[in-house]
Amino acid sequence: MAQFLTYDEERSRAFLSVAGVRLLRVDDSDYESALTDVLGADTAEKARIVAEPPADDAAAAMGMGAWHVNGGDEFETVVDGRGIVEFMTDKGPVAVLLEAGDVMAVERAEHRYRPLTAQAWVLRFVGDDLAAVDTGRTSGPWPIP
């Protein structure tokens, strides 16, 4: 289950909701409705990836580790491993530790990601490519779970 690192669960979920982020589990009763709400009719799996932990803090601030917004909405499922996703909200960054069975539904919200272990994901998203765009936001230190 997602572990909220910045604020308690209730506040984190409220801040994330305003930013366009929902966190759920694969066994939640509203999983299917959330999937179609975010992706529409095209809910097909687009890819499976394994994200490896970065070698150092400099590497952790590049690529997915840099603040970015993807070109379309996404519905991503963690298969195994652990990683931190930090989402930008109107209250500042909200960090979440995600593990196997966690799902993040992101509707064009600014975020950055750092795997802590090799972390496998099932990727579902709108369009043919996530088309990530770096926002240029300066990355601060990563939260420690």
Image (cartoon, rainbow, N blue to C red):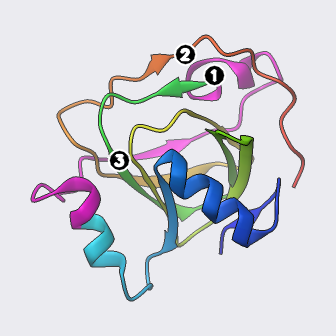
CA separation in Å, label 3 and label 1: 17 Å
Helix, strand or loop under label 1: loop
Identify which residue is drawn at 83% across, 24% down. 140
First along the sequence among labels 2 and 3: 3
Which residue has dot 1 on it? 66
Relative side of 63 to 139, left or right: left
Q: Position of residue 62 (x, y in %)?
A: 64, 17
Which amino acid type corresponds to the residue marked 2 in the rendered image? Thr
State which quarter of the image contains the C terminus. bottom right
Identify which residue is drawn at 22% across, 54% down. 39
Which amino acid type corresponds to the residue marked 1 in the rendered image? Ala
CA separation in Å, label 1 and label 2: 8 Å
Kindly indicate whether the residue at mark 2 contacts the one at mark 1 (C-beta within 8 angstroms).
yes
Between 24 and 62, the residue placed more toward the observer is 24
Which residue has dot 3 on it? 74
Q: Position of residue 28 (x, y in %)?
A: 44, 84
* Category of crowding for the residue at label 2, using alpha-carbon neighbours closer than 10 angstroms: few (below 14), some (14–19), many (at least 20): few
Q: Which residues are magenta?
A: 36-65
